[in-house]
Amino acid sequence: MTLPVEQLSAPTIDLCSSPLPVCTNSSSTITPSKNSANNNICPPYEYKINWVPPQGRRRRQRTVFTQSNVQQLDSVFMHNQYPDIELRETLAAQMGVPESRIQVWFKNRRTRARTAHRQQLKLSESSSSH
């Protein structure tokens, strides 16, 4: 049986008021270390730190364009790789997505076209050199 993380509880330790020296490792586990004052080894206690990530902004959900949207965007891209704000806003309104998503789509599409062009040049150079 597994419990949700919220229901798991581990003893916590206040590091500032702890009478024992502690050492930490990368797994967020604190274990008492050798007491350098009298060379006694502390009891083998292990404390888990309950780390909760800060409540920041949630990530934006990925935009998925339909096949007809992609065809429309590709059609515009064939005529104009750098559409102005008015055209991007018109496309965004038609597709029901923010204009910024359209802008990013064109940026990514230009990168893909450039990469494909470079690959094509490499292939033509390698085939002509043999």
Image: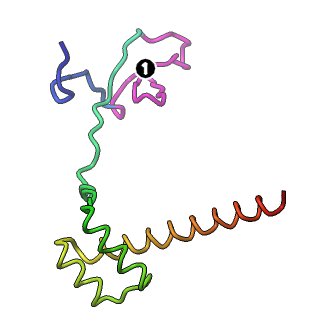
Q: What residue is shown with label 1?
A: 31
Q: Nearer the viewer, residue 103 or 76?
A: 76
Residue 32 within the segment the image draws in magenta: yes
* Residue count near mark 1 (Cα–Cα under 10 Å), binned few <14, some 14–19, many ≥20: some
- Which residues, given as a range, are shown in magenta? 15-42
Task: Identify the residue shown where x is 29% and y is 87%.
Answer: 87
In the depicted structure, whether residue 101 falls above or below residue 123: below
Look at the magenta stretch and give its main secondary structure: loop
Q: Nearer the viewer, residue 51 or 73?
A: 73
Task: Identify the residue shown where x is 47% and y is 28%.
Answer: 24
Instruction: Label 1, secondary structure: give it.
Output: strand
Instruction: Judge left or right: residue 6 versus residue 18.
Output: left
In the depicted structure, whether residue 96 falls above or below residue 8: below
Instruction: Judge left or right: residue 59 versus residue 24.
Output: left
In the depicted structure, whether residue 111 falls above or below residue 62: below
Residue 26 within the segment the image draws in magenta: yes
Task: Identify the residue shown where x is 24% and y is 62%.
Answer: 66
Q: Looking at the picture, which amino acid does disc 1 mark?
A: Thr
Give the x, y percent position of residue 97: 21, 71
Q: Nearer the viewer, residue 76 or 10?
A: 76
Task: Identify the residue shown where x is 44% and y is 70%.
Answer: 109
The N terminus: image quadrant: top left
In the depicted structure, whether residue 56 falls above or below residue 89: above
Give the x, y percent position of residue 72: 29, 74
Name, please, the residue furthest toward the right. Answer: 130
